[in-house]
Image (spheres, rainbow, N blue to C red):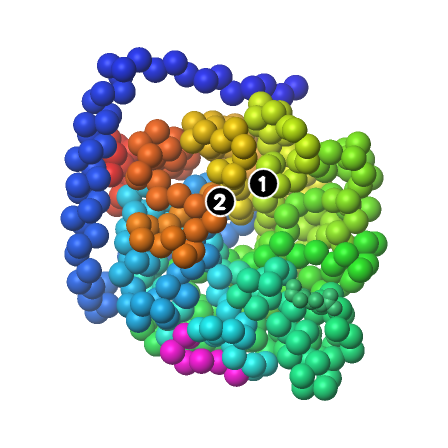
């Protein structure tokens, strides 16, 4: 049974004081972002590696649930600005909201400000920008989920690798899916992975593979391999790359980066894919959530949530909410029963391009997503966290899309996010809260 979330009626009086408090909060955030002095010689917060025990994440012996966010732009921004101001502002703002993990791109293949300029060749200045991103996150006690390549074209992606192979005369095929099966391209990618994992951070002196600031690695953003809908090609690639990564880095958690569609090996689950009555497109993309996530080298499962991209036709808002809940419950049940590992929703977003869009819809969508996770977490279930897509700081229109937000510009959204941070943190015991989480949740400072 799926329930619609109950919308709360709130009177003006109960809104007034939070708004006043919020206004002073904005002033506070504004001024605290002015403080850009940073001294890397001061002791940094001690972070432990995140581990998996059963179907939960554990840090310092306690369950760890993630209220996380996406800011894909961090490395690119530091490279273009030649400074870390915006990244630091984002990390500080995230920390003040009780957010604990940020997912971001640790790749930029070919093109402007590329990290990898051609196979196995790196721009040291861009690498230093990534070093700085990691150092900034560490300074604020934020962990990073780092993604290693894009299935899509943005920032290079698999088509850039295929183009490189053709240019070097070693490519087997111009099909972009040859990224997954061409042995030369597999070698390119492995060499890239090895360079990243063994990179010694020029700011902190710590090799990436030894740095607990890194929550974990994600192999590829939203992989699809439509030329082999059996799923064998992509599965084989994931297996080989995951084994390779684990041979170099045994400290960090690893996930795939799937959208989460059910594939041919899970016939009973196909009804959960978007609108199966309109055809089985989602099962034919070459990805296969349960099969791919079940590999022993994959530490936690990941899926995305985009009801307004996935559901075609004139779909009512309430139906999108209901689908979101069904989709999440189904994947969490997979984590509990079939995979026996944590499940994270590493992207979820609500588009402002819908023709009936109102900001309050996005608030309610977020609330539904958060409520499902909290419901699972309370029962020690496998629903381990979410990463909203996507956060920006002011003045970053170039990086925005129809999902981007500067969250403190909308008090109701800010409250929904911070309340979720606090209820998740309280599951680990309020006695163990520290830093910004303690200020936020125990001292009721909303910033
Ligand atoms: C590969 O992807 C690129 C970028 O999306 C596209 O321009 C190109 O046509 C694709 N190649 C093939 C063979 O489909
Ligand atoms: C969840 O796990 C904690 C600690 O392991 C335990 O104290 C608690 O009773 C469990 N809760 C449920 C609902 O099983």
User: Residue at position x 20%, y 33% from top?
Assistant: 23
User: Residue at position x 59%, y 81% from top?
Assistant: 119
Q: Nearer the viewer, mark 1 or mark 2?
A: 2
Residue 397 sits above or below residue 174 on the image:
above
- What are the residue bounds of the magenta stretch? 121-127
Classify mark 2: helix, strand or loop: loop
Q: Which residue is mark 1?
A: 305
The quarter of the picture where the C terminus appears is top left
Callout count = 2
Q: Which residue is mark 2?
A: 402
Q: Residues within 10 Å of mark 2 (few under 14, many from 20)?
A: few
Residue 37, located in which quarter of the rendered image? bottom left
Disc 1 from disc 2: Cα separation: 15 Å
Residue 142 sits above or below residue 318 on the image:
below
Q: Position of residue 274 (x, y in %)?
A: 70, 36
Q: Tag 2 or tag 1, which sits nearer the N-term?
A: 1
Asked if the residue under mark 2 is in contact with the one under mark 1, i.e. CB atoms within 8 Å, the reply is: no
Instruction: Name the outermost residue toward the front.
Output: 355
Q: Is residue 123 magenta?
A: yes
The quarter of the picture where the N terminus appears is top right
Classify mark 1: helix, strand or loop: strand
Q: Which residue is at the front of the view, 355 or 154?
A: 355
């Amino acid at each position: 049974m799926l329930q619609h979330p109950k919308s709360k009626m709130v009177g003006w009086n109960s809104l007034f004081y939070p708004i006043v408090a919020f206004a002073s909060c904005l002033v506070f955030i504004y001024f605290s972002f002015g403080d850009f002095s940073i001294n890397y010689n001061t002791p940094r917060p001690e972070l432990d590696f995140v581990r998996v025990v059963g179907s939960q994440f554990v840090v310092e012996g306690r369950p760890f649930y993630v209220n996380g966010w996406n800011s894909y732009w961090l490395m690119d921004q530091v490279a273009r600005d030649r400074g870390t101001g915006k990244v630091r502002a984002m990390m500080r703002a995230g920390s003040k909201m009780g957010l604990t993990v940020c997912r971001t791109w640790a790749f930029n293949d070919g093109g402007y400000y590329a990290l990898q300029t051609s196979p196995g060749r790196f721009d040291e200045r861009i690498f230093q920008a990534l070093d700085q991103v990691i150092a900034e996150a560490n300074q604020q006690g934020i962990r990073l989920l780092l993604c290693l390549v894009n299935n899509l074209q943005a920032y290079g992606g698999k088509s850039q690798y295929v183009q490189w192979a053709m240019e070097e005369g070693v490519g087997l095929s111009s099909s972009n899916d040859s990224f997954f099966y061409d042995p030369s391209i597999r070698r390119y990618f492995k060499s890239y992975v090895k360079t990243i994992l063994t990179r010694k951070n020029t700011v902190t002196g710590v090799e990436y593979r030894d740095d607990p600031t890194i929550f974990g690695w994600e192999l590829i953003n939203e992989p699809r391999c439509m030329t082999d809908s059996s799923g064998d090609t992509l599965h084989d690639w994931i297996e080989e790359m995951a084994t390779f990564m684990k041979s170099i880095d045994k400290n960090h958690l690893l996930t795939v980066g799937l959208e989460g569609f059910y594939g041919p090996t899970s016939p009973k689950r196909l009804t959960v894919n978007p609108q199966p009555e309109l055809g089985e497109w989602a099962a034919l993309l070459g990805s296969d959530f349960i099969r791919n996530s079940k590999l022993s080298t994959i530490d936690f499962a990941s899926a995305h949530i985009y009801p307004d991209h996935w559901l075609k036709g004139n779909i009512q808002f309430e139906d999108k909410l209901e689908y979101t809940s069904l989709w999440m419950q189904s994947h969490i049940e997979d984590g509990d029963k079939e995979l026996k590992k944590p499940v994270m929703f590493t992207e979820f977003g609500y588009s402002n391009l819908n023709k009936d869009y109102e900001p309050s819809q996005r608030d309610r969508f977020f609330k539904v997503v958060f409520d499902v996770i909290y419901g699972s977490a309370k029962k020690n279930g496998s629903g381990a966290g979410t990463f909203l897509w996507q956060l920006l700081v002011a003045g970053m229109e170039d990086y925005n899309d129809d999902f981007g937000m500067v969250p403190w510009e909308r008090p109701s959204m800010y409250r929904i996010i911070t309340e979720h941070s606090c209820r998740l943190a309280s599951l680990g015991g309020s006695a163990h809260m520290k830093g910004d989480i303690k200020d936020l949740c125990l001292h009721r400072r909303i910033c």
